Amino acid sequence: MSELTTDRQIDRSKMTVSDEIAVEIINMNKWYGTFHVLRDINLTVNSGERIVIAGPSGSGKSTLIRCINRLEEHQSGKIIVDGTELSSDLKNIDKIRSDVGMCFQHFNLFPHLTILENCTLAPIWVRKTPRKEAIDTAMHFLEKVRIPDQANKYPGQLSGGQQQRVAIARSLCMRPRIMLFDEPTSALDPEMIKEVLDTMIELAEEGMTMLCVTHEMGFARQVANRVIFMDQGQIVEQNEPEEFFNNPKSERTKLFLSQILGH
Amino acid sequence: MSKQLAYVRTEMLPQQTPPVTSVGMLGWLRGNLFSGWLNTGLTLISLVAIIMVLSAVVPWVLSPTWQATSLTECRGILHELGRDGHFSGACWGVIRDRWVQLFFGFYPADLYWRPILAFLLLAVALAPILFSDKVPAKLLWFSAAFPLLFPWLLWGGAFWGPLLILAGLVLAYLVFLQVSRASSTLPGLIAAVIFAAAWFLWGMGLITGAINYGLGSARMEGTRAALELRVDGLETREAEIDQAIASAQDAVREVMSGEAEAVASGDGAYRALIARAAAPRDRLNTLQSEKALLDEALFSAQSLLGRIEVLKGQEEALPRLKQEAEAARAALPRTVRKIDTDIGLEALKQRILSGEAKVPAEDMAQLDRVLGLETNLRSVILAIDRTYADVAMIGLRPVTSRDFGGMMLSITIGVVAIACSLPLGILLALGRRSDMMIVKYLCVGFIEFIRGVPLITLLFVASTLLNIFMPPDTKFDIILRVLIMVTLFASAYMAEVIRGGLAALPKGQYEGADSLGLNYWQAQRLVIMPQALKISIPGIVSTFIGVFKDTTLVSIIGLLDPLGLSNSIRADANWNGIVWELYGFIALIFFLFCFGMSRYSMYLERKLQTGHR
Amino acid sequence: MTTITDPPKQQFRLSMLIYDTRYRSATIQVVALIAFMLLAAWLIDNTARNMMLLGKTINFGFFGEPASYDINQRLLDYTSRDTHLRAALIGLLNTLVVAILGCATATAVGVLVGVLRLSHNWLIARLMTIYVEMFRNVPVLLWIVFIMAIMIETLPAPSAFRGDNATASMLLGDTVALTNRGIYIPEALFSRSLGDIHFFGASSLRFDVSLDLIAFLIVLGAGLWASHRIKRRADRMQEETGNRPTTWYLRVGVVLVPVVILLVALGFHLGYPELKGFNFSGGTHLRNSLIALWLALSLYTAAFIAEIVRAGILAISNGQTEAAAALGLRPGRVMRLVILPQALRVIVPPLISQYLNLTKNSSLAIAVGYMDITGTLGGITMNQTGKELECVLLLMLIYLIISLSISGVMNWYNESVKLKER
């Protein structure tokens, strides 16, 4: 796997981390049946942070970020997003979900709606935005991900990379403060990976708070300000990218890095 | 920002048990039955409903009426237990009395082993197809031969019948091989079809006739002697049975003489009485059915004996009868000479009645005489042939279709229809996907027509019209006619299922087969069909379930499948008023078959799914 | 058969009909066509000869003759002096009545059961599974005769409702009577009725249409149209301002209020069944045969519809629900905006083919004596006139027309909702 994601210069001027806390997870535990998937997770994410979560498959990375917008329910501990604690109260969930955007491995675009309708659906029904305004916003973000000309096509007519960029635009239309990425590039061909990562880098350059589960170590090195390594449902090691890659402390991290970078 | 940023876990946390509220019995209950108000409410309502249904059904089912022989006796037993009213208890006596009939219809009781063996062998023949991974493939040879064995076991007949059919198929295949080697596949196919048609329409009849005549002449004297002995033996046995029946009747009467007393005393006496009566009643039933069988055997033996007696006379009279008929026809007056069966006596009579044709009355009388002579001649020839055939018969005793009934009939129709409809359905599906316009539209027309009309109208065709569509004087069996229509019906649905399987195959499979140089039929047989059929198996099984359920429709045109039998049972004075027990029992049998099949198809789906990954 | 279009060098040989790909397909088609025509000719020739032997001719004149049998459940007026044509028409209407009633009930029950089968409530899901398996795996004809027999054997006779010590009583405040001769329900009556319009005079095709019904339908239609306009206005408001006004009470009111006013104006009241002599009179009498057929067909078909609905909902991948939830849509809207539009594409085609099956299965009416088109044209008319060929062919034609119209609707739907793919 190539180390470098992009050949362009990354503008770090707006990539600042503030003191404001975006997400706080305290002693969180989760079980699937009797299987203990997330064990005693403690994590604080400040606004403007770009966090990459890595780890072997089955280590609980996806489950962790899916807990953050309550696609999965945790059984003990606390998750506080933007000052709101996640509970089974529908109002809280609504608020958090409209503040937190998410992109999936398989895009999950709605195949019966056009690209534009995919992007305006949530603003119209959740944010109560007038249609015209919603369309303007959608076109703005579609331009940003460089596919405004596909707006009236259906997802099935687009390539994988294009679909994932639409999915990013769809999330951005809700103007989220935090973006979650669940392996956004693992279902894509190599040349499409680049176009999606470029979009994500642009997002980072604008100062978006991002939590990203990915195997793109080049992206982690260039964009992340923190890399978290998970194994067996727990956070094993976290550090700045330079330290993490050049000087891993834990044996598990070393093993993982040697496997993923070693060839 | 980096003050707590770097972090390394020094020791791994062990797996912990989840909080009690989310796992175990309690967690399961909370998650599945009592999560939220709505769910709790629904759970409670359904619990109440279940309890109500069970509290009604369980005592009803557990009703000690197994030995009763009529609805009145059932009511008597239940009344004695203090259970009155419509829903007090089931009357299981009807099942005990009639279950054999519900399974076999009026099939001769001494031949039950034949359908049982046929269906056991059916299971053996199906095993290598249904469980291809667990049963040796060599059994497939048996599966291939089974379609010939199956009807022979059920309908009986001389053993050379299935062998001649087999010979016809083998010979047709040889013709196909020879001709297609000499020219190509298509002429080979046409030649084979023509040969097969000739063989089955004429050849087989000729050969069977020759065998009957040869064997019949050789065995005539021996058969006569054996029959005389047999008639003597049967008559002796019959006298014994009559005596036994009389004594059994006495025994039953003796037990039942205490009926009024037992009813009056209550207290379980009536139930005990019925239980006591069960054994003598059973004995009486066995004896009576044995007597019926004896009567039948005696009658057929005597009638064959009688026919052998008159055979010689018939054979001697034959030339004279022939001559007479021919002479009489030659002497017909001009007005009616052309009126033979081809133009139609009925039509002529109508034309006379309406005044269109003028024929003198004496000419008409002469015509009637000629037709009478000819009919007589034909019946004598037929009688002679039949006598020879009966004497020559080596094989299983023939059973007529009229005697078929019960589940046996349903299964027979279902199995035959599905087995025949599969190849037909494959051909129709291929035709429908073909590039050839005419072939395609013929297939589309057939499929859409059959799928557009209810099965019952096709059964009407079987019962009223199919004989009209066939050449005059072909009278074929009602079950055969029903089988033809049900097969056509099933094949249209099968074609759609298989077409779905074909459509699901990627185009690359066809291209791959073409690139290897396989011709159309090779590609279909070796590459396309094995995959398409595999994909379609769930659909095929559900078509089979559908056809099997639809066999109940034959009761509407008067065949005695379980539903048809249920009507006659409910009309029986003893069981007048029976509903739940009877229909429940039939429904249960159908349920077991259909549910089993649908489970099998799910098993297969799972197996195939893992096979593909 | 010399061909001019052939290249000059290649002479046409007979064997090319089989070996040359250009001619091969034509040869096969010609052979197939000839075989088909031979078969058809053979069948027609046989039929003609047989008909002649039986002294029969093919004609439809019997339709003009009096049917002289009774039809007890009917929509239009009919007496046994009416023609066979009228009997067939009454039968056809009866087929359509039971088909429409059955489809509506089967859909309602099927959708409910299908959704409940996916319920998180273990008990409910299991109960629904039992329902589906029980009805799916037992022949529909068995259900029909079973329900018929239950009604005849277990419901009380009308005489049981009589006298001071009656053993049976009417339900719902003495408005509905369940008897072994059928179910009596209240009928709609108008004291200031507008009367009827008569069509086709006294011919076999005559029918009356109640003006009350027409007025009712017009007012209902106008109400629905107004309600639709209100919805459109709400849509526009939402598009402009983003906020959707609450309009459901307006929409319900605009339909209900005029209808109620009309009914009052026409003097609407219910006519209740009453016990007179040995039987009930007044009200609408639904015969056992209709009830048994209707119930059995709907419950049986509902089991299949439930499976279709379940499969349709399951076919929408979990990712769709998650993505919609991640965007902040509430579960109700996730269902309405994302899941249902997609699930309907999967559900509707097999659903329509179930409607087709139900309509075809309604021909089993003959087993319980409900006089549908099979019972009249294919039953008594056929037996009385002996015109088997005409009756059965016409019967098939009628079912074929019904089936083809239903599948025409299905094809149109399939075309209109096809997903666009690369």
Image: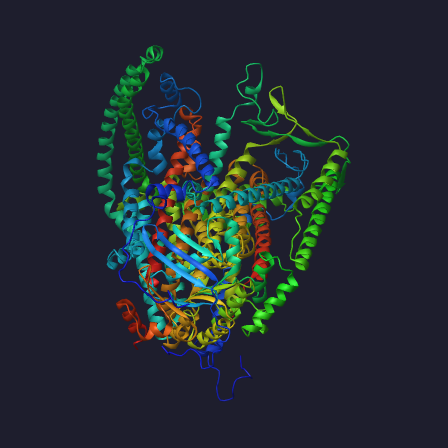
Residue B7 drawn above or below residue C51: below
Residue B166: x and y in percent read 31, 57
Q: Quadrant of the N terminus of chain B?
A: bottom left
Given residues C299 and B121, the one toward you in this image is C299
Residue A32: x and y in percent read 35, 52
Residue A49: x and y in percent read 45, 67
Given residues B478 and B29, the one toward you in this image is B29
Given residues B469 and C86, the one toward you in this image is C86
Residue A10 drawn above or below residue B335: below
Q: Is residue B543 visible?
A: yes
Q: Is residue B467 visible?
A: no
Given residues A219 and B458, the one toward you in this image is A219
Q: Quadrant of the C terminus of chain B?
A: bottom left
Taking the image as shown, residue C311 lies to the left or right of residue B17, namely right
Residue B244 drawn above or below residue A187: above
- Outermost residue toward the front? B3
How many marks do you count on the picture?
Answer: 0
The picture quadrant where one finds residue B293 is top left
Colour scheme of the picture: rainbow
Residue B14 drawn above or below residue B558: below
Residue C95: x and y in percent read 59, 42
Q: State the residue at coordinates (47%, 61%).
A: A22
- Outermost residue toward the bottom? C9
The picture quadrant where one finds residue B586 is top left
